[in-house]
Image: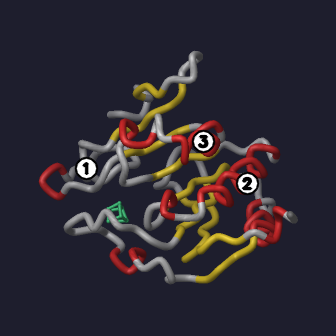
Amino acid sequence: MNIYSQTLRVIKIFHGTTVDGPGLRTSIYFAGCEHRCPHCHNPESWDMNAGESMSIANIIEEIVENKFNVTFSGGDPLYQNIENLTLLAKEIHRLNKTIWLYTGFTIEEIKDDEKYKDLLKEIDVIVDGPFMIDKKNIDILFRGSTNQRILKKNKEGLWELYEEYNK
Ligand code: SF4
């Protein structure tokens, strides 16, 4: 199997964003989301067929254009082919770039699921949980509502609050 020819469904790739994690980042917005959060900021991303099919090779080509770290957003990236998303994440780590993942699932829903095990090894930070309009807060960092948490892996490989950013 040529891993670089495997594909993912991408709506858009932004270079140099400052809202999807610290510093300048390359944000990849993947298609598809079934969480259907009321007042979602981006309902056009819910369609699994939105955007275009991109090979891992083409996505990597865009990522190496700059020194930015990478964010997976959407939609919810966890509705992608997880095997292919894991291959992409491994390639990004080989480039010594960190990966932030935004998902509408909570960490409790995904951390022990075999399906996501290999992918989560390649993720540095997770911003978890659905957007909740009654918990909306425009003053918090990198999140839309206060139920969402920014989580990083501790030395034991367990996910814990990233205190620096949960403000
Ligand atoms: S998880 Fe994100 S993209 Fe999906 S419905 Fe909720 S806010 Fe929208």
Q: Which of marks 1 and 3 is in front?
A: 3
The answer to whether mark 1 and mark 2 are in CB contact below 8 A is no
Label 3 sits on a secondary structure element that is loop
Please state which of residues 105 and 19 is positioned toward the viewer in this rendering: 105
Q: Which of marks 1 and 2 is nearer the N terminus?
A: 2
Q: Earlier in the sequence, mark 1 or mark 3?
A: 3
* Residue that badge 3 annotates: 123
Residue drawn where x is 59% and y is 74% of the image: 10
* Residue that badge 2 annotates: 87
Q: Nearer the viewer, mark 2 or mark 3?
A: 2
- In the image, what residue type sits under mark 3? Ile
Horizontal arrangement in the rendering, residue 68 relative to residue 91 (left or right): left
- In the image, what residue type sits under mark 1? Ser
Residue drawn where x is 57% and y is 16% of the image: 156
Residue drawn where x is 60% and y is 57% of the image: 82
The answer to whether mark 1 and mark 3 are in CB contact below 8 A is no
Res 163 quadrant in image: top left
- Name above or below for residue 14 compared with residue 134: below
Quadrant position of the C terminus in the picture = top left
The alpha-carbon separation of the residues under discs 2 and 3 comes to 12 Å
Residue drawn where x is 47% and y is 35% of the image: 112
Q: Nearer the viewer, mark 1 or mark 2?
A: 2
* Residue that badge 1 annotates: 145
- In the image, what residue type sits under mark 2? Leu
Percent position (x, y) of residue 154? 54, 21
Tell whether circle 2 marks a residue whose Cβ is less than 8 angstroms from ligand 1.
no
User: Which of the labelled discs sits on residue 53, or is there none?
Assistant: none
